[in-house]
Image: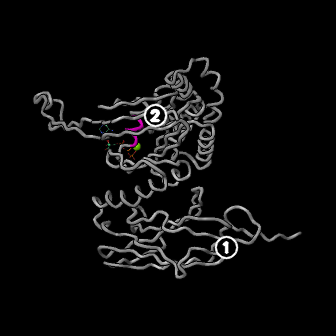
Amino acid sequence: MVNTIEVQGIFKEFVIHHERHQSLKERLLHPGSGTSEKFRALENISFSIAAGETVGILGHNGSGKSTLLKTICGVLAPTTGEIKLRGTLAALLELGAGFQPELSGRENVYLYGAMLGLKRKEVAAIFDEIVDFSEIGKFIDTQVKFYSSGMYVRLAFAVAVNVDPDILVVDEVLAVGDERFRAKCMDRIIRFQREGRTILLVTHDADQVRRLCSRTIVLNRGELVFDGPTTEGLKVFREHLHASEDSTTNSANENIEITSVTTPSGTFDVRSGEGMHFDVAISSAKAYAGHFVMELHSRRGELISRSDAMTSPVQLKPGSNVVGIDIAALPLLDGVYDLNVGIVDEIGQNVLAWSEKAATIEVAYDGREQGIIEIAPSITQL
Ligand SMILES: Nc1ncnc2c1ncn2[C@@H]1O[C@H](COP(=O)(O)OP(=O)(O)OP(=O)(O)O)[C@@H](O)[C@H]1O
Ligand SMILES: [Mg+2]
């Protein structure tokens, strides 16, 4: 298969200047007095992506995701290493990267098209479509600096998907904008996938990656720590990185681990509508007041349910702990579902322990409803 993106041994260093003398006068009196240090944002990154693949890039804040995308798009030059692209590329980079604030939306669309190698006539031919998709309306002639972040993303997305690129690169931006527009973008990305285009998606959102990407690259502090199937990538991202990264900011995060998830009968087979019970064994190095959270996913990766962590406190004691989970009635239809369980901190922000695909639940259903959950409407003729 032909590779569309080849990244070979990329390093990216930023030079950070520390000024010791703040005022201009002092700086003139003490030239060169500031110190500078090099910061390595990317370390020896290599991978290749075949035509038609959708690859997710996961990593915590500051892990180098945006820097990597910018080097791939040519916005930033790598310090060393090489990037080869085959085909045209359209990018939706972080907010602020891409458009010229002083120019109007219209001028930016033409400028962006030109950057992608389109002739003015070619942009003109798709211009209405872009404005239509973006729902910017009459604001298309307003300077972009007056746009809200939602408007900005809408226009950027509309341009990126309408210029007919072979490769689409998206950095995070899908988190901006209202629910309806996000769904519209998501539909468009799925259409892109079906058309066999190559997509590179940067996000913190594990659910998005689970839905869209079969392959995932995980970055941690500038290094590529995983490249492979998404299920495993999510495991690496959540189980290992959370534990190691958070421990620097919150010492309570150390050494909480989910050791097993079991049921009294030993199986996770259940009849639709029946309840189930399972025990989650957790080992903890010290006493900790956390919250329990569970997720169910369909085999297609859709999130079916995530429990409310704020109403599920658990008091962990040092050593082994067992938390019993009761589900009164599982309204799922026939199928196989993945169970993830985790412990989060008191504000529900940091994952302290996580077990991705802790168990597979098989639901048997005798009825005739189709889909994922049983609604069982009662029909009355009035
Ligand atoms: N222009 C720059 N000058 C100096 N350091 C930079 C520059 N751009 C990025 N960095 C640093 O490089 C590291 C990686 O940043 P990057 O923006 O790529 O991370 P990220 O994974 O996209 O994070 P986030 O999830 O917050 O978007 C960070 O420590 C950041 O501070
Ligand atoms: Mg970023």
Left or right of 331 on screen, residue 64: left
Residue pointed to by mark 1: 272
Q: Does ligand 1 reach within 8 Å of label 1's beta carbon?
A: no
Q: How is the image coloured?
A: one colour
User: Residue 7 at what x, y percent from top left?
Assistant: 39, 35
Q: Earlier in the sequence, mark 1 or mark 2?
A: 2
On residue 74, the disc is: none
Q: Where is residue 298 in the image (x, y as percent from the top left)?
A: 59, 60
4 relative position to 123: left or right: left
The answer to whether residue 234 is seen in the rendering is: yes
Residue 67 within the magenta-colored segment of the rendering: yes
Which residues are drawn in magenta?
A: 65-70
Q: Which mark is residue 5?
A: 2
Dominant secondary structure of the residues highlighted in magenta in the image: helix
Outermost residue, front direction? 1
Residue 162 falls in image quadrant: top right
Q: Residue furthest left?
A: 29
SS state under label 1: loop
